[in-house]
Amino acid sequence: MIKISPFSKKVYQLTKQVPKGKVTTYKQIAKALNTKAYQEVGQALRNNPYAPKVPCHRVIKTNGLIGGFNGKTKGKEILKKISLLKKEGVKIKENKVLNFKTILFTFS
């Protein structure tokens, strides 16, 4: 059985809310959790045992860059993240989301 921290569970619950065709950021998730633990959000998503049900590929950096995926920051894993996002209609050029501000999902 996988042991998941209460913090990670909250991260996963929020991430599940991000709809197809939208992205959010590590910072937006941390903000919704009333913390500045952006890296801890990243670690939780890196260890996400529920993908694709918890769509961690929809979480990117605050500057619109794709960022890592499955704990990797280069190579096939990044290409996989880009492929998943493109299939959902997200436009990406040079590892950056083009219409970032318009498709950014924020938590109310």
Image (tube, rainbow, N blue to C red):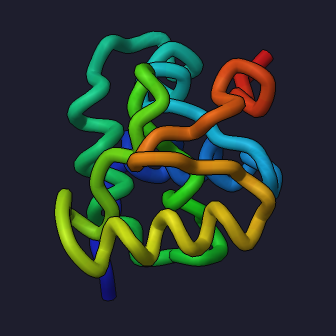
- Residue at the far front: name it: 94
| Image position of 74 with respect to 29: above or below | below
Task: Please name whichever residue, 72 or 6, is drawn nearer the observer in this view of the structure.
Answer: 72
Q: Is residue 59 left or right of residue 23?
A: left
| Image position of 31 with respect to 85: above or below | above
| Image position of 93 with respect to 84: above or below | above
Q: Where's residue 37, x and y in %?
A: 27, 22
Q: Is residue 11 left or right of residue 21?
A: left
Q: Where's residue 106, x and y in %?
A: 71, 22
Quarter of the figure that contains the N terminus = bottom left
Q: Where's residue 108, x and y in %?
A: 79, 16
Residue appearing at x 40%, y 48% in the figure: 95
Task: Please name whichever residue, 50 or 84, is drawn nearer the observer in this view of the structure.
Answer: 84
Residue appearing at x 29%, y 69% in the figure: 70
| Image position of 42 with respect to 70: above or below | above
Task: Please name whichever residue, 34 or 27, is drawn nearer the observer in this view of the structure.
Answer: 27
Q: Is residue 43 left or right of residue 105?
A: left
Q: Where's residue 94, x and y in %?
A: 41, 47
Q: Is residue 97 left or right of residue 88?
A: left
Residue appearing at x 57%, y 39% in the figure: 97
Residue appearing at x 40%, y 32% in the figure: 61
Q: Quadrant of residue 105?
A: top right
Task: Please name whichever residue, 33 or 81, is drawn nearer the observer in this view of the structure.
Answer: 81
